[in-house]
Amino acid sequence: MNKQYLANIRALLDKLENTQEEVIDKVSEICAKAIFDGHLLYFFGTGHSHMICEEPFYRAGGLACISPILESDLMLHEGGAKSSSYERVEGLGNVVISHTAIEEGDVLFLISNSGRNCAVIDAALEAKKRGAITVAITSMNHTTNVTSRHSGGKNLYQVCDFVLDNCGEVGDASILLDGMKQKIAPTSSVLDVTLVNLVIANTTEKLLAMGMVPPVFTSANTDEGDKANKSILETYRPRIRIL
């Protein structure tokens, strides 16, 4: 077993815990208020980051008021290199957001380790025009060491209302083996999923404190799951078309 990777992940999770607590609490407060007022949490990312958008969606123990934006051309199953090309196309993010129901009071999480590509930047800008609150999930180490590919000259963290730093390093991969020039063992997925679930857990706590029973899914693979989820699905299916 390569224990160096486990050690790297533990160290980064410790750094995340020690540096992101305040912003996680603030973002969770924003999310709780949005849900309490009847709004949705949206998630958008390209390439591997789209997996982070699927993490909280229709998830046992997860909130039902979550709508992932899954654009096929920006996901890996339609072609890895193709998705990299599309995420650099300026204006595409605007189109993606225009085909959602994002509105004032909603919260949009935008996931990008580098934060430099046009799709997520344009999506953030378009969502803000609609009055949504934007939250970047990115690596500040990476994004501050690369230039923007957007004509506006800014990276994702510079156009969002809040920034959650996954604390990962430049290039994502974390282990350099003897005889290799390229590192292996990326860390962003583990760290991003942790950030998302921390926000969801804290948001749920805050909703309870506000007197609202959070709409949380029971596992569909338990005997009581289908019955427990029936009313939640009836409530949110009209608003979340892929639910």
Image (spheres, rainbow, N blue to C red):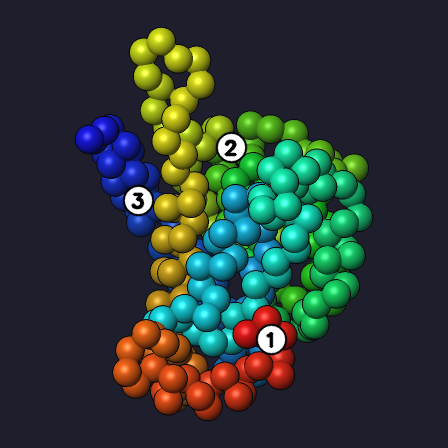
Q: Position of residue 129 (x, y in %)?
A: 75, 62
Q: Which amino acid does label 1 sit on?
A: Ile
Which of the image's four quarters has the C terminus?
A: bottom right
The residues tagged by marks 2 and 3 sit, at their Cα atoms, a distance apart of 17 Å
According to the picture, the residue beneath numbered tag 2 turns out to be 142
**In the displayed structure, would residue 19 be above or below residue 209?**
above
Residue on which disc 3 sits: 13
Distance (Cα) linking label 2 and label 1: 33 Å
Measuring from the top left, give residue 127's x and y in whole percent: 70, 61
Amino acid on which the number 2 mark rests in the picture: His
- Residue positioned 78% across, 57% down in the render: 95
Q: How crowded is mark 2: few (under 14 residues within 10 Å), some or many (20 or more)?
A: some
Residue 126 visible here: yes
> Which residue is pictured at 57% across the width and 63% down the height?
68
Report the side of 206 relative to 100 (left or right): left
Name the amino acid type tagged 3: Leu
Q: Is mark 3 on a helix, strand or loop?
A: helix
Q: Which mark is residue 158?
A: none
The residue mark sitting in front, 2 or 1, is 1
From what the image shows, is residue 198 above or below residue 35? above
Q: Quadrant of the N terminus?
A: top left
Which residue lies under the disc numbered 1? 240
Q: Is mark 1 on a helix, strand or loop?
A: loop
Disc 3 or 1, which lies upstream in sequence?
3
Which quadrant of the structure image shows residue 219?
bottom left
